[in-house]
Image (cartoon, rainbow, N blue to C red):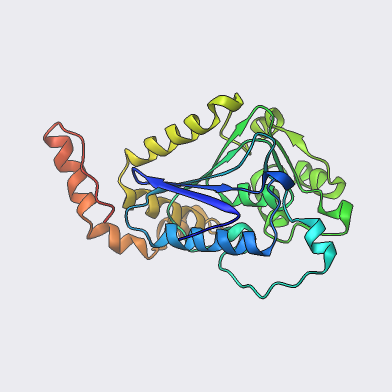
Amino acid sequence: MSYQFIQVDAGDHITTITINRPEVMNALHPPANEELGRAFDAYGADGDAWVAIVTGAGNQAFSAGNDLKVAASGEKFDLQWNGGFGGITDRHDLYKPVIAAVNGVALGGGFEIALACDIIIASESATFGLPEPRVGFVAAAGGMHRLVRMIPQKIAMGMMLRGKPIDAGEAFRLGLVNQVVPADALMETACGYAREIMECAPISVRLSKQAALANLHLPIQEAMHTPVPLMEVWRDSHDLREGPLAFAEKRKPHWQGR
């Protein structure tokens, strides 16, 4: 599958998706969004792909969000794609894990892409914010809804209503990112998280994600007794049998993802 505005590398069960528009700080226009939609479609459908990492090309930006110069030009694109902005912000049926490796600016839609991922690893130079109101926009790709669910309400409202960014250290203190590392350690750290995820049974990982997100709105007692679709797949899976067998035989499990 060919791409112009992103790069996709796959191997050892890891799919790395790189937004490749560094000349505009990896801001996204419709053609780039369409490619990201296709890339996430492919990741979801590939039985050999167990973890995805999303990052930005260069050392300045993960993504500066919507390409405002293209938006202001009025240029029309006859394009449609799955998954919302960045191919992921409105994708609610992807239960494989996605890691954001934020290598610089993550503003507006770029921050919304990171918020839609399951894990965020940030470089020390990373910044996060939703500045859309400063240019007459709103964070309509999930930012208005995800941020206020992830950090204290007053902090989230202060960020959104002022349109002011925070640095990586503050994002870590607030629990928005899992780890802050030097820039030259970013991708290795993200890959390390991916490898640790792959030590677990893929079907168990996906079921955990599906149950956690699908039942997030429910009281604990109700959530514990509300089945999700992957539960039946897990109960009949090879990996559920393989885990105890490998433990009994004192060897590493051979996961199949089914």
Q: Seen in the image, is 116 located left or right of residue 198?
A: right
The tally of labels here is 0
Quadrant showing the N terminus: bottom left
Which residue is drawn at the image coordinates 88% and 55% (left, top)?
Answer: 135
Vertical arrangement, residue 84 with respect to residue 204, above or below: below
74 or 178, which is in the foreground? 74
5 or 201, which is in the foreground? 5
Q: Position of residue 221 (x, y in %)?
A: 46, 55
Q: Seen in the image, is 118 located left or right of residue 130?
A: left
Q: Residue furthest left?
A: 249
Vertical arrangement, residue 83 with respect to residue 254, above or below: below
Q: Position of residue 201 (x, y in %)?
A: 30, 46
Do we see residue 34 in this rendering? yes
Q: Position of residue 223 (x, y in %)?
A: 46, 57
Q: Position of residue 98 (x, y in %)?
A: 49, 48
Do we see residue 214 in this rendering? no
170 or 35, which is in the foreground? 35
Which residue is drawn at the image coordinates 68% and 60% (left, top)?
Answer: 141
Which residue is drawn at the image coordinates 58% and 56% (left, top)?
Answer: 4
Quadrant showing the C terminus: bottom left
